[in-house]
Amino acid sequence: MSNTLQELDFNTLTHRSFTPSPAAWEDQVLYFLLIDRFSDNKESGFSSAGTRSLYQAVDNGNAVKTEADAAIWRAAGGTWTGGTIKGLIQKIPYLKNLGVSAIWISPVFKQVAFQNTYHGYGIQDFLEVDTHFGSKEDLQQLVREAHTAGIYTILDIVVNHTGDVFSYDADRYLTTQNGRTFMESRWDGNPYRTKGFNDATGKPVIPFTTNITAGPDDAIWPKEFQDPAHFTQKGQITNWDYDPEYLQGDFFDLKDIHLGQGATDTFTASAGLTHLIEVYKYWIALLDIDGYRIDTVKHMETGAVRTFASAIHEFAQRIGKDNFYLIGEITGDRSFAFNKLEETGIDAALGIADVQQRLGATAMGQSSPDNYFNLFRNSILIGKESHTWFRNKVVVMVDDHDKVNQGDHKARFCAQEQGIQLIRNVLAANLTTLGIPCIYYGSEQGFDGAGSGDGADRYIREAMFGGSFGAFRSKDRHFFNTSFPIYQEVAKIIAIRRQNVTLRRGRQYLREISGDGIHFGLPVPAGNGGKLNSIIAWSRILDDEEILVAMNTDTDKEQSAWITMENTLHRAGDVFTCLYPSPGGPPAARVEERNGKALLITVPAAGFVLYKKE
């Protein structure tokens, strides 16, 4: 255990070769997983000690046959389920075969001992790996073996807050909840009295001061963080959009760190921020990781984000990681997120505004597709009338572990009616439209988690290894099924993406279509709120190459249409062959003189196709 930052030997840690960064992150396919919910190293077919069988359709609902069983299953989803780093190491071949080239893993740092913060966001020791997940050596092995397999590693980190490491002695806002009356520590801009640092059992019996005596599970570590001045101490956020409340308040019982003060250009970093920079430089040096996903960037001062990003980028460049990627979780509208990127120097935002929702609605035929495709034109935001695009500035995914836009009801894409029929399409669109694509674990296996009420997040965080909280309301069955149709089809599409730079870096255009070859227009839903049962087509263009991509939102019947192509790149009679789903897919198509130039294609019900000129 490293008790202080002073003990870190950066000279030794950095005196070696490091894995270079990728040239372009938009070339990568990310895969996001929660360590606790991914693998416990006990799945049959993957481990010599594996005893848990592969899930079969007959296992659906085997954990909820009675209400008592269902209650046990639900409770299991609210606590640690047993996933480990060693389990993830074992599944590197599973990810490699899918085509994943970068894994984004949830925080692995030591959590407060008295809470079930299996998600990793309640940090008690910034320099240690939580024993639920494994050890530092396990984490080093993971990154090393992932690199050997050609897979980069992005680690989820927290800069904004710690776990519940001290308790307030609130003296205002009398509140009654569930029959209990107490003083609530609600944010009002003024600091609260404190009772003390919490011990390993959650009792605030350790003086809230410096120079304390604490065990490894008490208070907070490393020792430099045991200073009350490191915390804003202003209580819990109640208005998530009010400035400065969302900057200075606590995330529920997670304690906000004071990061500094001042305007962006004259920002003065606090000792707490300086310590955090050293912490995260240490993990880069120790692990040879390739990027960070920074939690709750919206809730950090712009100057703090810029200071952190600059320091991390400079350190990474000094050791040979010239494109170490910083991805920020930035909630709020696109203008806010874009400005945050521009002002702070972080590299990309995670699912700006409603990207996720609009991607899903487009694949479902629930909205006009231009609602999604227009999100990637940032010419308005930068004040230029040119076709400048969000290309490597947005990480796009259809499902994630929070689904913050869904309120108290959480649901994966496949929980929707027709979701399982269209999951291939939405993942394919994610992989072939602009942005850095990211697959949320379980999507490739058709997970359909959904639920409401307190702790509803658990329902979209099913255990991939099964255990006591498996997907499809099951238990004791795992889901690493490389023969599952969605897994196999996604792997094919990723392989095509890897072989065609145009699909990774090209400009993007939503295409007009026509049923009669005469009247062309963008597809729109019929009537007010009607379902769009149609081909949706788009092009990716790089230099003089155009690849046509199309999907059919109609789950019952095939659709045919003429698709507008780039007029100046093609001649009548040019032949486009089908890259996917060939072999046995649609035949080649010839360019015709219609609406400039167009291709006549047919897409099967709930189908997806890719065409490229011979």
Image (cartoon, rainbow, N blue to C red):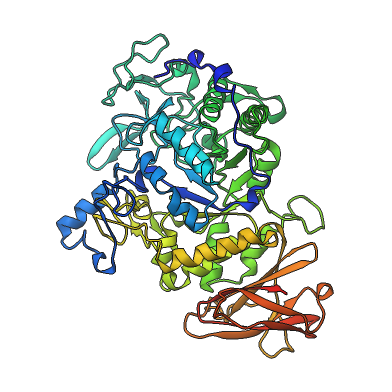
From the viewer's side, name the closer residue of 58 and 257: 58
Residue at image location 52% in from the left, 78% down from the top:
531
From the viewer's side, name the closer residue of 430 and 29: 29
| Residue that sits furthest to the top in the current view | 211
Residue at image location 21% in from the left, 57% down from the top:
70
Is residue 184 found left or right of 139 in the rendered image?
A: left
Is residue 169 found left or right of 541 in the rendered image?
A: left
Is residue 16 found left or right of 476 in the rendered image?
A: right
Q: Is residue 86 visible?
A: yes
Residue at image location 51% in from the left, 59% down from the top:
398
From the viewer's side, name the closer residue of 252 and 470: 470
Asked which quadrant contains residue 197, the reply is top left
Residue at image location 66% in from the left, 58% down from the top:
504
Q: Quadrant of the C terminus?
A: bottom right
Asked which quadrant contains residue 67, the reply is bottom left
From the viewer's side, name the closer residue of 184 and 285: 285
* 517 vs 263: above or below: below
Q: Quadrant of the N terminus?
A: top left
Total label count? 0
x and y, in percent, of residue 110 in the image:
38, 29
* 382 vs 368: above or below: above
